[in-house]
Amino acid sequence: MAKQTIGSSKGDVYVFQIRILTQNLSSLHQQIEDTEKTIENAINSMNLPPWKTIPSVGVLTMATLLGDVGDPRLFGSAKKFSSFLGLTPRGKQSGSSVNRKGHISKCGPSHIRQKLYMCVVSALATKKNPLVLEVYNRLVSKGKPKNVAIVACMNHLARAI
């Protein structure tokens, strides 16, 4: 069918162009695979804890995280790392109302929070990460808004990394 419809009215030039574009596309796919393998090998050479065992966290998420933050172990604790990423609630004090928890601090790199958000949404959609599912379901069943539960899952995911 494609042989009859694509390029048939304009001659062999269009068929040749489509063949070249198809080869270019195949080459680009191969370059992407090679680049992802190179990135994965670089991450593996850092001797990090087994991040591959965390469902929904992929090579690109880890590469983004390591490229911006460096080695998460340098923070000393998972809580400090999560706080650096801006996933912990900031304190709010005003007059007589003290020690209220506010929104997340958002003090770290926003694109890493975006990657973690996508990891959590992916984990919820595929139901492959039991930690994320358990935290999310527990908080939603307690009446927390869904976005609050998602941010809490992002916090747990960051601490697991």
Image (tube, helix red, strand yellow):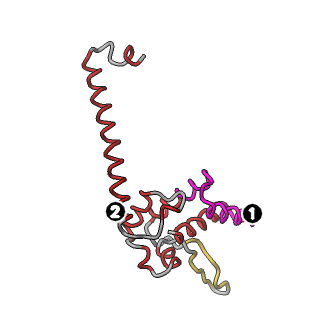
Mark 2 touches mark 1? (CB < 8 Å):
no
Looking at the rendered structure, the secondary structure element under dot 1 is helix
Q: In which quarter of the image is residue 30?
A: top left
Tell me residue 1's x, y (percent). Answer: 43, 16
Tell me residue 39's x, y (percent). Answer: 35, 58
The range drawn in magenta is 118-147
Instruction: Looking at this view, name the residue that lies furthest to the right.
Output: 142
Separation (CA) of disc 2 from disc 1: 41 Å
Residue 141 falls within the magenta-colored stretch: yes
Q: Name the residue under label 2.
A: 42
Q: In this view, does 69 lie above or below 127?
A: below
Q: Name the residue under label 1.
A: 141
**Residue in the image at 67% along x and 63% along y:** 134
Mark identifier at residue 2: none
Q: Is residue 127 above or below residue 15?
A: below
Residue type marked 2 = Ala
**Residue in the image at 55% along x and 74% along y:** 88
Residue type marked 1 = Ser
**Residue in the image at 70% along x and 66% along y:** 139
Instruction: Please tell me which residue lies in front, 150 or 43.
Output: 43
Q: Quadrant of residue 15?
A: top left
Q: Is residue 96 above or below residue 120?
A: below
Q: Main secondary structure of the magenta part?
A: helix
Q: Which of marks 2 and 1 is nearer the N terminus?
A: 2
- 135 vs 83, left or right, is right
Residue 152 falls within the magenta-colored stretch: no
Tell me residue 155's x, y (percent). Answer: 56, 69
Instruction: Please tell me which residue lies in front, 47 or 62.
Output: 47
Neighbor class of circle 1 (other Cα within 10 Å; few <14, some 14-19, many 20+) is: few
